[in-house]
Image (cartoon, coloured by chain):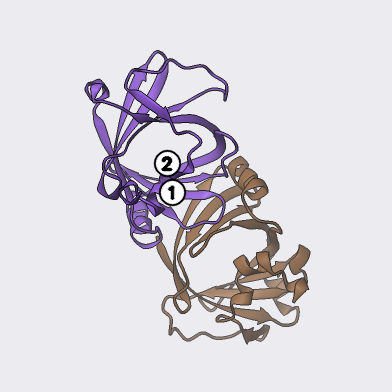
Chain colours: A purple, B brown
Amino acid sequence: MGIEIERKFLVIGDEWRALAPGTLYRQGYIPTLESTVRIRIIDDRGFITIKGMTQGISRSEFEYEIPLTDAAQMLDTLCKPPLIEKYRHKISLNGLVWEVDEFLGQNQGLIMAEVELKSADQSIDLPEWIGEDVSHDPRYYNSNLAKHPFSTW
Amino acid sequence: MGIEIERKFLVIGDEWRALAPGTLYRQGYIPTLESTVRIRIIDDRGFITIKGMTQGISRSEFEYEIPLTDAAQMLDTLCKPPLIEKYRHKISLNGLVWEVDEFLGQNQGLIMAEVELKSADQSIDLPEWIGEDVSHDPRYYNSNLAKHPFSTW
């Protein structure tokens, strides 16, 4: 188990593109009431992740690798469409790893950057391609983007 | 992934007790809308199981072993109380394995036997300690026993 503390921002411009290649992520959510149960395929590896309810900007997280065929089957049969598809670019800068997600499909046009912190009050240097802080806006949770995609806002 | 086809019965009398020792199971459910997400501890091993919606007496099932500490933490923080606690007795008879569950806590007094089948129409010899067939009664799903325990019926 880990506690995830992250901040999330909109991305502006294209300067981040030269900094890291993208990897295709395909993920969906098993419909739940409080916790989040995510099924994810990264390239050819499958994962299941259980996250507790968000408290501020932190939440408990449990992740396990699972067979790719299981992940594909759960995405197709147990997760509610539409699935989230995005290219994730992992960019290391000043001791932090920025995950820039460029969404596809029904969330095309949305580009978000997440950074994981060691503590909730850690100060961070913001690269110039970082825009609005949307950490506290639940519309930008991936689980909500699966229900209410960016293209429908 | 497996497809689980099982039949479930009430148990009568005590003759089954001499046939196999019991192992303590402790399990809970992450609140979901359609699929079932179960966290289970058997002795000192943890598991997470995802089951699709029941179709007749079969449903898809995905099970993974996880660290015991993760399972304990999810049972305590993500699963809705009351947890299900039971002793499971695995009894092999005529090529079938009967799982006799003797419930504790808020489901005390309930004793059920499950048998997993190879096909939905497989014929089975019923031991004399097998009572009413409750395969199709959703009150007896463990996930429902966690919400509406036997003692409250």
- Residue B60 lies in quadrant: bottom left
Please report the residue visible at 57 percent of the width from the left and 21 percent of the height from the top. A121
Question: Can you say which quadrant of the picture contains the N terminus of chain B?
Answer: bottom left
In the displayed structure, does residue A153 sit left or right of residue A57? left
In the displayed structure, does residue B5 sit left or right of residue B147? left
Q: Is residue A113 above or below residue B135?
A: above
Question: Can you say which quadrant of the picture contains the C terminus of chain B?
Answer: bottom right
Q: Is residue A153 above or below residue A130?
A: below
Badge 1: few (under 14), some or many (20 or more) residues near its Cα, within 10 Å?
Answer: few
Q: Chain of mark 2?
A: A
Q: Nearer the viewer, residue B87 or A61?
A: A61
Q: Amino acid at mark 2?
A: Tyr
Cα gap from disc 2 to disc 1, whole angstroms: 7 Å
From the top left corner, tell me how far across and down residue B107 is, in percent: 74, 68
Residue with the mark numbered 2: A140
Q: Amino acid at mark 1?
A: Asn
Q: Chain of mark 1?
A: A
From the top left corner, tell me how far across and down residue A74 is, in percent: 38, 57
Please report the residue visible at 32 percent of the width from the left and 54 percent of the height from the top. A72
Question: Tag 1, which secondary structure?
Answer: helix
Residue with the mark numbered 1: A144
Badge 2: few (under 14), some or many (20 or more) residues near its Cα, within 10 Å?
Answer: many
How many marks on residues?
A: 2
From the top left corner, tell me how far across and down residue A47 is, in percent: 40, 45
CB contact under 8 Å: marks 2 and 1: yes
